[in-house]
Image (cartoon, rainbow, N blue to C red):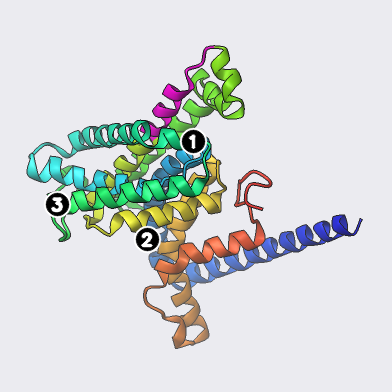
Amino acid sequence: MATATLERFTLGSRSTAARALLVLTIALLLVTLAVRPRLFVQNLIGGIAYGMVLALIALGLALILGLLGVVNFAHGGLFMLGAYGAYEVVALQALPFWAALVIVPVAVGLLGVAMEVSVLRRLYGENPIIGLLATFGIFVMIEEAARARWGGTPLTFGVPPVLRGSVPIGFGQIATLRLVTVLIASLIIVGTYLLMYRTDFGLTIRAGLQDREMAEFIGIDIPTRFTIVFFLGAAMAGLAGVLRGAEVGMDLTIGFEYVLLAFVIVIVGGVGSIFGSVVSGLLIGIGVFVGPTVVRALGTVTGIEALNVSGIGSVVPYIIMLVVLLVRPRGLFGEEGLLE
């Protein structure tokens, strides 16, 4: 009786805190929109584009983690290979950027398959820390291979002239490359949802997760299907690397940086939730771009100079994760009991 009362009190407290936080967030956004409308809209657009790339990375990680149960730290290395692979295709092999959008994700996906078949297939059902250590080792190997092939200095590659302009939207403009990134990421996300939840293939994958022995007994080739899922997750990481590399370039730090962000996004969205990864990616992407603008606008309104902090955008994802887990420990759309 006392335990049930305590649980109801805790849930009520979390619900109240969530509503208060939502009201405060809306109020801060309205203040920012009133003080710096043009900058707010520009950063909102940029945050959506960035969030779609993050969602694409996290979606691949969520498929592997949620469906296969492997904490795949090597996902960051696959993302990094996507960026460097695009540099290889466009800058060194002089092929069109459009070719890189196809060649590189497929190549990274095949590398992911090799990784899954040779190493990770032996770890399904084992302690997750074993998979984490194995994939961390693979990540280090990928990073050193990239250093040996492309060096340690930052690199960039050119994009077609059609992607170098901008498109006017409302108060501001969005770079054509960012707009294309949003469109491509949206198509991949919708396609992944339809594949996993509207096809027999997705049904058999979920059946294998619920009861692998029974699924194999009725003739479903579970290992092959899991390998296909791993290919899709790795290819998404490679595609995200191509798109991000085209916009900002690449160096050897991006693999570690983005795999940490991907894990944050998966945790915030809820482990195992495809929809949660997309929502969380957008939330964090917008937060990274809009958060500093909100803080500076608040500093302008209140006259507190200390609020004009540089570099605050880099800690926004972790602030969001902390707040979400305090209010909802299993993430925004996670299954009950998974993280609690």
The three-letter amino acid code for the residue at tag 2 is Gln
Return the residue nearer the eye: 314 or 208.
208
Image x and y of residue 256, in percent: 34, 57
**Mark 1 against mark 2, which lies toward the viewer?**
1
Residue stretch in magenta? 219-232
Which disc is residue 317 wearing?
A: none
Q: Is residue 300 above or below residue 182?
A: below
Q: Three-letter amino acid code at disc 3? A: Ala
Q: Residues within 10 Å of mark 3 (few under 14, many from 20)?
A: few
Residue 219 seen by the camera: yes
Name the residue that disc number 2 marks.
42
Q: Nearer the viewer, residue 38 or 332?
A: 332
Residue mark closest to the camera, 1 vs 3: 1
**What's the residue at 55%, 70% (across, down)?**
28
Return the residue found at the far right: 1
- Give the SS element for disc 2: helix
Q: How much space separates mark 1 and mark 3, taking CA atoms?
A: 32 Å
Q: Could you say where residue 193 lies in the image, as x and y percent from the top left? A: 49, 32
User: Residue 183 in the image: x percent, y percent?
Assistant: 36, 39
Can the viewer see residue 282 in this picture? Answer: no
Name which residue lies at 53% across and 21% down.
204
Give the image quarter of residue 257: bottom left
Q: Earlier in the sequence, mark 1 or mark 3?
A: 1
Residue located beneath label 1 in the image: 124
Q: Amino acid at mark 1?
A: Tyr
Seen at 64% across and 43% down, the residue is 335
Q: Is residue 139 left or right of residue 52?
A: left
Nearer to us in this view, 95 or 75 = 75
Q: Quadrant of the N terminus?
A: bottom right
